Image (cartoon, helix red, strand yellow):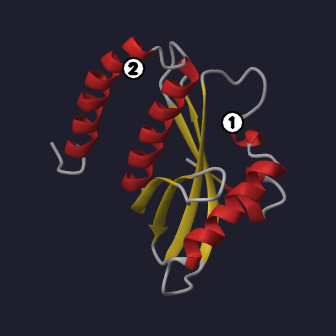
Amino acid sequence: MSSGRIPELITAAVERITGLLRRQRKEAAHIQTGRKGEDMAYYHLRRQGYTMIARNWRCHGRKGEIDLVGWDKSILCFIEVKTRRSRAVATAEAAVDREKQAELCGMAAMFMRKMNSRPQFRFDIVSVYLVPGEQPKIEVFKDALSRRTMGATRRH
């Protein structure tokens, strides 16, 4: 077993244990689904070579959060993760509307203010599909907010 897989297995075990506690608290199913999708996206991106530096980053006095922040080589990536249990209505990445994009840009600006350097950066979107009866599917859209169409940036 590779050492890169060990943290993923530990996270899965902790998730199973804490899942019992969440059920006792009656946590909403969509919150559990979103958390699972973020965990899957985190490990998927690490396997793709990203160096992750923050999860669920928030800034005092500002609404929202950045799901993941990581380096893809020399580029700092602000990553929004969208998880769905179906493709019936709209794609997961379509949920990153103008309001969400503005929120992400504002949060990224706050993150950058706390850094000493000004690296090149981009916004990525990761769609995670957890359709019952199917294998999970993860799609990464690199530089998603600067493109007219996300289909041109699709990476598996």
Query: Does 151 sit above or below residue 22?
Result: below
Residue with the mark numbered 2: 22
Where is residue 9 drawn, in percent x and y? 24, 36
| Distance CA(mark 2)–CA(mark 1) | 25 Å
Q: Disc number at residue 129?
A: none
Q: Residue at x 78, y 30 (%)?
A: 90
Q: Which residue is drawn at 81% across and 54% down?
A: 149
Toward which corner of the image does residue 51 lie, by quadrant?
bottom left
Q: Disc number at residue 92?
A: 1
Where is residue 46 drawn, in percent x and y? 38, 55
Quarter of the image containing the N terminus? Answer: top left
Query: Does 40 sit above or below residue 110?
Result: above
Where is residue 141 drawn, in percent x and y? 64, 53
Dot 1: what SS?
helix
Toward which corner of the image does residue 29 lie, by quadrant?
top right
* Closer-to-camera residue (131/100): 100
Q: Residue furthest bottom?
A: 117
Is the residue marked by circle 1 packed among few (<14), some (14-19), or many (20+) residues within 10 Å? many
**Is residue 28 toward the left or the right of residue 17 in the image?**
right
**Is residue 107 toward the left or the right of residue 47 in the image?**
right
Query: Does 26 sit above or below residue 112?
Result: above
Q: Which residue is drawn at 74% across and 49% down?
A: 100
Q: Which of marks 2 and 1 is nearer the N terminus?
A: 2
**Which amino acid type corresponds to the residue marked 1 in the rendered image?**
Ala
* Closer-to-camera residue (97/131): 97
